[in-house]
Each structure stands twice: as structure tokens, then as C-alpha cells.
Image (spheres, grey):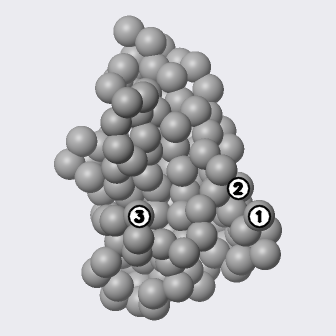
Amino acid sequence: VQLQASGGGLVQAGESLRLSCSGSTLTLEGWGIGWFRQAPGKEREWVSYRGSRDGTRDYADSVMGRFTISEDVDENTVYLQMNSLKPEDTAVYYCAATARGPYNSNYKRMVDFQYWGQGTLVTVSS
């Protein structure tokens, strides 16, 4: 398993969670890291992206201003800080890694990523 996502749980609307994506055999600093989510009965959708060594940080409109992607290079971990959570944020969250280098502009589709974590469930109650 190259990636492991963790940190999900059950929270109330308005609360926060921080998800972690840890690399086991991958050194995440050299990979573009994306977060996706899949709600029950829906397709997996892109949430956020951290570019490889290029400063890129991008977010889906639905989470802009509430979610923040960051990393701890020493811990080989990429985080997704989720604030002001809403019931519609309820989903299984996945992290994924792409080997495409800096200034990659293809990161919003599942096919853009080569490695996936196993997913962590986030449930937001109203």
C-alpha cells in the first residue's frame, strides 16, 4: 500500500476534521497529491490538489474557503483540513498520487492519478 488515508469520523455540522494522507513507499513531496470524495450513490469527485514542488494548491468550488491542503515533508504526510463542515460533505475521502511533475494541470480526474489510498469515511450530521 503506497498511500494511507486516515482521520475521518463523525462530526456535527460546523465542526472540523483533519484528514491525513501518508506515504509508505512513496515520498509524497515528489508527487502531486489529490483528494477526492465519494458520497453514497454518487460518483467520486475531485476535492483538492497539492502540486509537486510548485506551490500549486487548488480546490473545488464546493470546498473553497473551508478546506485547506497542506503537507509536512518530515512526516511524509499531506493533510486536508476541513472546517465549517456541512452534511453534504459526508463521503468517503480518498487521497491519490500522480507522477506528473511540477505545473501539472491535469489533476481533476481519477485517471490522472496512479496510486490511491484506501479511503476514510467522513460523516457530518445536521
Quarter occupied by the N terminus: bottom right
> Which residue bears the numbered disc 1?
1
Residue positioned 52% across, 37% down in the render: 92
Callout 3: SS: helix
Residue positioned 40% across, 74% down in the render: 112
Q: Work out whether residue 15 can be spotted.
A: no
Numbered disc in front, either 3 or 2: 3
Q: How many marks?
A: 3
Give the spatial CA distance, label 3 vs label 2.
17 Å
Disc 3 residue type (three-letter): Met
Q: Is residue 59 left or right of residue 70?
A: left
> Which residue bears the numbered disc 3?
110
In the depicted view, which residue is nearer to us: 112 or 30?
112
Disc 2 residue type (three-letter): Gln
Tell me residue 6's x, y (percent): 68, 44
Callout 2: SS: strand
- Label 1 or label 3, whichever comes before in sequence order: 1
Tell me residue 81's x, y (percent): 49, 45
In the depicted view, which residue is nearer to us: 55 or 89?
89
Tell me the tag on residue 4.
Answer: 2
Residue positioned 60% across, 70% down in the render: 115
Tell me residue 94's x, y (percent): 54, 50
- Residue 116, image quadrant: bottom right
- Label 3 or label 2, whichever comes before in sequence order: 2
Numbered disc in front, either 1 or 2: 1
Tell me residue 78's x, y (percent): 59, 61
Residue positioned 35% across, 44% down in the render: 43
